[in-house]
Image (cartoon, helix red, strand yellow):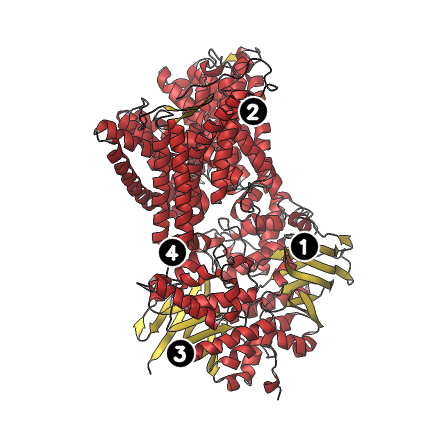
Amino acid sequence: MPTLLELEDLSAGYGAIEALQSVSLSVEEGEIVALLGSNGAGKSTTLRAISGLLKPRSGRILLAGSPIGGLHSEAIVRMGIAHVPEGRRIFPGLTVRENIMLGASNRAGVTRRQLNEDVAEMFGIFPEIERFANALGWTLSGGQQQMVAVARGLMARPRLLMLDEPSLGLAPLIVQQVFKVVARIREGGTTVLLVEQNARIALSVADRGYVLETGRLIVQGKPDELWNNEEVRAAYLGGRVAQTG
Amino acid sequence: MIARLGLAALAILSLLLALGVGLNPYELNILVQAATYAIAVLGLVIVLGLTGQISLAQAGFFGLGAYGVALGTTIYHLPFLVSLVAGMVIAALMGAALGASTLRLGGHYLAMVTISFQQILTLVLTNWISVTRGPDGIRDIPRPILFGVSFAESGRYLAFCLVLLYLAIYAIWRLKQTRLGLGMQAVRDNELAAEVVGVNTYVTKVIAFILSAALGGLGGGLFAGGFGFISPDQFSFAESVVFMTMALLGGVQSPFGAALGTFILILMPEWLRFLKVFYLAIYGLAVILIVRFMPNGIWGYVEGLRRRQAPAPIGPVEPLELLSSRDVKGGTLLEVQDLAKHFGGLKAVDGVDLSIERGTCQALIGPNGSGKTTLLNVLSGIYKPTRGAIRYKGENVAGMSPHMLAARGVGRTFQNIRLFGSLTALENVVIGALRPGHDVPGGMAGVRARALAALDFVGMLDQAELIVSGLPYGYQRRIEIARALAGNPGLLLLDEPGAGLNLTEKQGLVELLRRLKGHGMTIFLIDHDMNLVEQVAECITVLNFGRKIAEGTPREVLRHPEVRKAYLGEETDADAA
Amino acid sequence: MGGRHEPSATGGWMAFDLALNLQLLFTGTGIGAIYALVALGTVMIYRATNVVNFAQGEFAMVGAYCMVITTHGLGWPYGLGILASLAMMALFGVVFNLGVYYPLRHRSFLPVIISTIGASILLTNGMLAGYGPEPQTLPSALGFDGIEIGEVFLDSQYMLIIGVTILLVVAQYFFFEHTLIGKKLQATSQDKEMASLLGIPVSRMIMLTFIYSAVLGGIAGILVAPILFVSVGMGSQIALKAFAASIIGGFGDVTGAIVGGLMLGIIETFGAAYISVPYKDAFAFLVLFAFLLVRPYGIFGEKVSQKA
């Protein structure tokens, strides 16, 4: 099976900030890969570089072998990557149904009927939000919005679904619900790249994980290995004597 | 230096020419128009160029000044100067009223207010016939007689106007380096940071409007005397736009530029008379092109080329004095009781108790969305608390605006660095040193010396004369800290000072914080990097969902099960082993 | 224009002249509809780009001149003239976007405002240079002057204005609420970045918005032309009032633009009849002042205060 997504020595940043420095990682088809690290580690920057919101400074991004670094997000999304960004970003003035429908905007030539069928399918995967179908986006709670955002992402029928901090600001119980859905998504055949601050829950669903610290990749491996790894704990909770340089 | 001498020589030469060379009346009139318009445009330099507030009412103030002189001399038979000053005072009062509206409004709303004012004024001038003589205007406006000398002769009157113009240019040029001028530029570059650094942004904006209106009135009064005849249609919204264009063309941030732009745009149609019909259309096109390609105008473009020279080296500096022996040692500096901040239904901070001991470094940590930044914003006065008490040095400061807290010695930096981008590092830090409540002996020179000391303390002395927007992130971070230190704060609030720094830069930051602790500085910081926090903080408070979940030494806190849960996630039964 | 009643000579305020007031209401609604159309065009651009277009009034002026050029200058029949004018306005919207907004789309709001002001001057004086300062007339296309109902005279052109405005508002409502592209436009104005992440072509959506606004402005100009004269200054007259209207209604809100426009037209007309004609234009700004000081976000609009 070919590698779906590959980052080679990717560097990116904002203005004077070097948020990512020479990061290399890969995602195989059918996997759930977790990207971990504390705040400011560069996780969101990685996703933004992949989906085209941020232009890389150097290095390559390859989607199934084709370079996509530097393309517009509209083009990248059409190639099969869906990015569910941090903070949900549901369109507040549109209904849940409309939000989900717009998720298919990257697909050419979709009929009204197909659209409605797909939306019905989404409500099947996310039965909790079906009763809000005609409610405006801003009236939903954080957890409900997260479901809508993921559903919207799936409507793009992506080859790769990228989730940025889906647990952010959500109560633990809701987080459990959201991640049950993430596991279900993988069963449907979609590949998932998951960025999370909550290492425990991320590693409970992931096949593999990478850990970033101040823009660099420090360790990678299977969930068990990472969870028991001193460096991972240190990246989150300190407890390590400072190294110079 | 050479440039300044050259300009001074040019000024004197122009005065001699005005007085001596026999220009015909038509040419003199054009030059008088240029000079008086330039004075009005200088008003825009203050309000828009320096303070960043949009004003499309300048023609209105120009008109008030003009009518002041016209009515004063022809109807009320007052001396020219008295009428001129009266017109300026009325204009200044109106300017104050407009400035007052900035308390609630900015951006396009402010633009609308100024336009409305302009429109109403034009209507009043046209229709209040009993006072203003309506659309027919006022004629036979005399020129002044000062100290027995008549300025009726056009060359003399031109010289008179030019002298006032040059004085105004000089005054504004000097203003940029004064406390008020620096405060204005701070408001323009980053209003929130200006507030936090101690600038009373509201009062600054009102003063900007007053000065701008007064200059508009001055120009208008001289214009009336120059042409002898005025009518309402000369002071309409279209003229406000013309003033704006002149300011933009020359460079709205520089008095020289504004004067240059005015002279060009008034003299140009004379040279391009054959284009008269298309002239105004070209005007409009010029505005679009200038905004796009020369956003800082001609002067700004020239200045941009000039600044690339290497800055002059700085001599030795005194070490930075922080705190003073008068300050009490030990005891509680800041006490927070049951603090809450709600945004509608969202309880960002939900009943937090906190106390910070003098001379200690305390850290606030917690996952994203836990309310840390909100808490810091409440402590620095940016948000008013929904409930709870904040006592700084025993005084209840809850609800005070940021500049009042700054005056009491609370210093703060921002997570996403808020420096005054178009100013140099030194100017940024000087603004910090000028905070109210902080008396530095030796006037501006003393302030400057202190600012240099602060830059030296953070290792940025070599960058003093460089514009901060071009500096690397790590340098900007340090300069922001220097800006806070220059004001000699009693309490330093740092919002994610490590954000965006690489490992080496973070180590440098740790060293800097340790040195500050050595001086007895009280520090309260937020950060995510546990490494950094561990090395500098004696006490850590942990927030989650707006509440305190743990507090203690780094050791205690980092082994606390609640904290581990908050950061690493819940332990499920299966993983308990 | 139709016949008018003079305010009642006996009693002033006390004698409530129903016919007069209905007449004023009708006229005020007509003028208000024009303000609403221009305000609507401004709001559309603002929602999509967060920029206030100070040249919106000139869109109306250009539309009116297009009609004059096609029907007088070229002698085309009225219907063809309208189609041609609307097509020209659409093209104008494209050029305006590319020339004025697009190059500055990443800059702060101030340069863009100033740029649109520059465009306003360019258009006004360009038209002046091209067509001369004399006001032009554009006769009403309708064959009849109006309808008399009791003592109230309903002018045909005003009826046309109100009718077209109602149609447009309804059509716009359907477009935005019931078509997919309408939803995409709404999404773009609510969160540009998120829209592009879904694959919605944001630049194209903004271009569509400018085209729509330009056509809307043109329609306003064509409708109001038989009432005011067609002159180069007609745009700024209307535009400033339209801005005032949208702030009163709530800046950035579509309903606010419409309600604000109608309210302003009515207030202005009643003010002119009962208080003073020369200061008629001042009412708009006085009401605006009042709103800006007391309730800057208007009746339906966004909160104005800063965020940290």
Query: Callout 4: helix, strand or loop?
Result: helix
Same chain check for tags 1 and 4:
no
Badge 1: how crowded within 10 Å, few (<14), some, or many (20+)? Answer: many
Task: Look at label 4 and name its amino acid.
Answer: Leu
Q: Which mark is residue B410?
A: 1
Chain at tag 4: C
Q: Whole-percent x and y of residue C68? A: 28, 29
Q: Residue at x 41, y 44 (%)?
A: C170
Task: Report which residue position mark 2 lands on.
Answer: B88
Closer to viewer: mark 1 or mark 4: 4
Task: Look at label 1 and name its amino acid.
Answer: Val
Distance between the alpha carbons at the discs numbered 2 and 4: 58 Å
Tag 1 and tag 4, C-beta contact below 8 Å? no
Question: Is the residue B180 above or below the residue C238 in the image?
Answer: below
Q: Which mark is residue A189?
A: 3
Q: Does residue B321 appear left or right of residue B41 in this picture?
A: right
Question: Which of the two discs, 2 and 1, labels the residue nearer the N terminus?
Answer: 2
Task: Look at label 3 and name its amino acid.
Answer: Gly
Q: Which mark is residue C116?
A: none
Q: Residue furthest front?
A: C150
Query: Callout 3: helix, strand or loop?
Result: loop
Distance between the alpha carbons at the discs numbered 1 and 3: 55 Å
Query: Callout 1: helix, strand or loop?
Result: strand
Chain at tag 2: B
Q: Does residue B434 appear left or right of residue C1 in this picture?
A: right
Q: Is residue A108 visible?
A: yes
Task: Look at label 2 and name its amino acid.
Answer: Met
Task: Report which residue position mark 4 lands on.
Answer: C180
Residue nearest the observer in this picture, B231 or C20: C20
Badge 2: how crowded within 10 Å, few (<14), some, or many (20+)? Answer: many
Same chain check for tags 3 and 2:
no
Q: Residue at x 48, y 48 (%)?
A: B422
